Amino acid sequence: MGILDFLKRKPEPTAAVAKERLRIIVAQERSTRGAPDYLPLLRNELLEVIKKYVNVDLEAININVERDAGHEVLELSVALPDGKPAGSAAT
Amino acid sequence: MSAEIIVVTSGKGGVGKTTTSASLATGLAMSGKKVAVIDFDVGLRNLDLIMGCERRVVYDFVNVIQGEATIKQALIKDKRHENLYVLAASQTRDKDALTQEGVEKVLDDLSKDEFDYVICDSPAGIEKGAHLAMYFADHAMVVVNPEVSSVRDSDRILGLLASKTRRAERDNGSVTQHLLLTRYNPSRVEQGEMLSVKDVEEILGINVIGVIPESENVLAASNSGVPVILDDNSHAGQAYRDTVARLLGETRPMRFLDAPKKGFFQRVFGG
């Protein structure tokens, strides 16, 4: 550290942020890799249907395709909120 | 004995694919191998400039594929190494001029002509040119910068290498994947401003075969049309030599991963 360093603005140490963001996005993209193209659309339409009855957001729906020898498993999980059903559900 | 086909690819543009292709091809030729390096970036020819043979291009890759020239007519002999040849991309056609059958025929002809290695310099992106550059590969050199978009794109490319190549489709073993980290700046890594080698290895789950430090010699080399591996005094050139040696099976320690020590004046006055 030089005595004149205070004159220079130092960039923030942001490598750790980059690493964390990449870790998450790479894991997410790997989990959907090789999955059918319709998966994102399916996910959105399912969300629309579920939203009619329960108040959930996009993050609450998880779709995974797993391959075993000879067959594929489409796994869908929805994390329901603790609260009451959406107000519009009855209408 | 068929030629080993190595694709140099990355997904993202501007990370150093062509610089790497030129140095890799030159390095293998320096080790006595017979090498051809092919520019797959149809429409945006650049490898010829980096190799310093831009004024000697008569026929290109597309001419050969369309039967307008033979492979022998189109290969440009390197002026420094007699066992190194360049096949330039077309400047005038679009990427649809490449066909899978055409590429396969060129690669087969090079094998018959006793080439040891064919380096395929991929265009950026994941469209036709990039797909064809990787399709027939035995090995892949994935070039990545320590930067978020480059790392993400290279993960995508690693996925494609494992599924959209001839080896993958025929269940014929997999394409050997090598990761090459370029434009690495050890001082910025030490300051926590740049992803480290270890970070990139952890995120992508694959070890690097080499780390090329960011260096002003790379620009100087491309300015003069001399692959940087021939610049013995530059760290980048030496790091490329190490990488080629590792590719040929040698074990060499990684160099240039630490920031240069600061002298007294730099310590006091910054710099």
Image: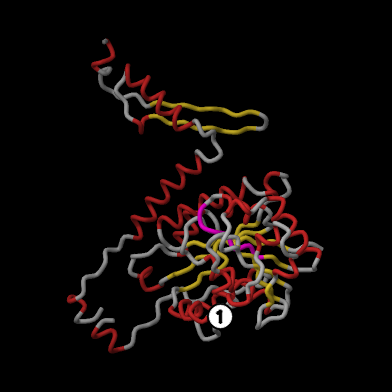
Q: Position of residue B195 (x, y in %)?
A: 40, 62
Q: Position of residue B255 (x, y in %)?
A: 51, 76
Q: What residue is shown with label 1?
A: B226
For the rendered model, the colour scheme is secondary structure
Number of other residues with Cα within 10 Å of mark 1, as a class: few under 14, some 14 to 19, many 20 or more: many
Q: Position of residue A68 (x, y in %)?
A: 63, 32
Along the horizontal axis of the image, is B19 left or right of B7? Answer: left
Secondary structure type for disc 1: loop
Residue under the image location 33 percent in, 87 percent down? B263
Residue under the image location 28 percent in, 84 percent down? B267
Along the horizontal axis of the image, is A80 left or right of B208? Answer: left
Residue A22 or residue B58, whichever sits in front: B58
Quarter location, residue A91 = top left
Residue under the image location 28 percent in, 89 percent down? B265
Q: Chain of mark 1?
A: B
Q: Is residue B112 magenta?
A: no
Quarter location, residue B192 = bottom left
Is residue B156 among what the camera can see? yes
Q: Position of residue A26 (x, y in %)?
A: 46, 47
Is residue B241 among what the camera can see? no
Give the tally of numbered discs. Answer: 1
Quarter location, residue A19 = bottom left
The amino acid type, in three-letter code, at marker 1 is Val
The N terminus of chain A lies in quadrant: bottom left
- Magenta-highlighted residues: B119-125
